[in-house]
Amino acid sequence: MTVKIFDTPDVQDFLKTVAGFDQEGGNERAKQIMHRLLSDLFKLIDDFDVTPEEYWSAVSMLNALGGQTQFGLLSPGLGFDHYLDMRQDAIDAEAKRVGGTPRTIEGPLYVAGAPEAEGFARMDDGKDQDGETMWLTGQVRDVDGTPIAGAKVEIWHANSKGGYSFFDPTQSEYNLRRTIITDAEGRYTARSIIPSGYGVPEGAPTDLVLKSLGRHGERPAHIHYFVSAPNHLHLTTQINLAGDPYTYDDFAFATREELVVPAERIEDAGVIAQRELDGPFSEVVFDIELAKTDVAELQTRHARPRAKEDEQDQHSQLAGTAKV
């Protein structure tokens, strides 16, 4: 079809009106962003000759994504989360904030308020009969190799079935979620279970979008981290366990080579007794380096809606309705 109307004066004037350029109220930045967004979409309709059937099918899919609170799940699947990390990496490089453990995506399943412990914490409640015992440990250091005592290490991960507590009502409160304050040598240790990867719900809106692109919705076994300390850049990251079939094929694009960590099987009876465990276990070692900064706002995680982070904020409450 050869009909193109996007560049006509009528359409360009219409876009300005829709974006509120002729109105005094509202937010100027919102107007500029909406004008750009609508312009790109209008041009897309023109360039690809989008039919009314295709347009309303897309609207239906957006309604389904919102109705099942899956935008937070689809976002990393479409690369937005990783793209934001790529931009932040470039911003840091331009500002000469270099070094430290690489960042990667947060995901939608953090829950604020996990129990806090000094040096060591047991993360699992002991009820996951299929869970293989994991000994997770590491040291937090600055880029010069100096241990950072008192660093806050927040950790969360899935159970053996790929479910996260709070979002999975079968699990106990804050199961597999802890905040550990590093000891005098900058070390943290957690007893937990090896997590499973997970896939987006079969037939759900996110799954349908990904399948329309010929893609899957699987994530490898992984463990999330927030790490912070005064005068250091806050770190949002996660490790992927080596050997998982999706380690290098993560639908959420969170894998970075430096963040692929092996789980070493330990069967030595002496080591098992020393750790006060009942049998063989897997040890995961993840050392963390934090870059230094004097900028206060870079020392804390960026603001976004997170479950239970602000009980008075509607966005925070809605963040707790994610479905995976």
Image: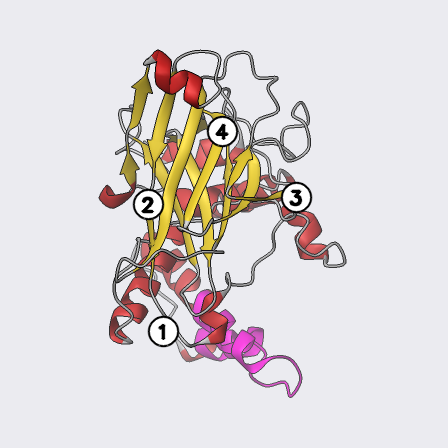
Q: Callout 3, which amino acid?
A: Gly
From what the image shows, is residue 164 above or below residue 115? Answer: above
Q: Callout 1, which amino acid?
A: Asp
Pick the front one: 112 or 267: 267
Q: Under tag 4, what secondary structure? A: strand
The segment highlighted magenta reads 11-37
- Whichever of callouts 4 and 3 sits on the residue coming sooner in the sequence is 4
Q: Under tag 1, what secondary structure? A: loop
Q: Is residue 258 magenta?
A: no
The residue where tag 4 is placed is 191
Is there a contact, CB below 8 Å, between mark 2 and mark 1? no
| Image x and y of residue 15, in percent | 50, 74
Q: What is the CA distance from the residue labelled 4 to the residue labelled 2?
A: 16 Å
257 left or right of 211 in image:
left
The residue where tag 1 is placed is 7
Q: Callout 4, which amino acid?
A: Arg
| Image x and y of residue 201, in percent | 52, 27
Q: Under tag 3, what secondary structure? A: loop
From what the image shows, is residue 98 above or below residue 63? Answer: below
Q: What is the CA distance from the residue labelled 2 to the residue labelled 3?
A: 30 Å
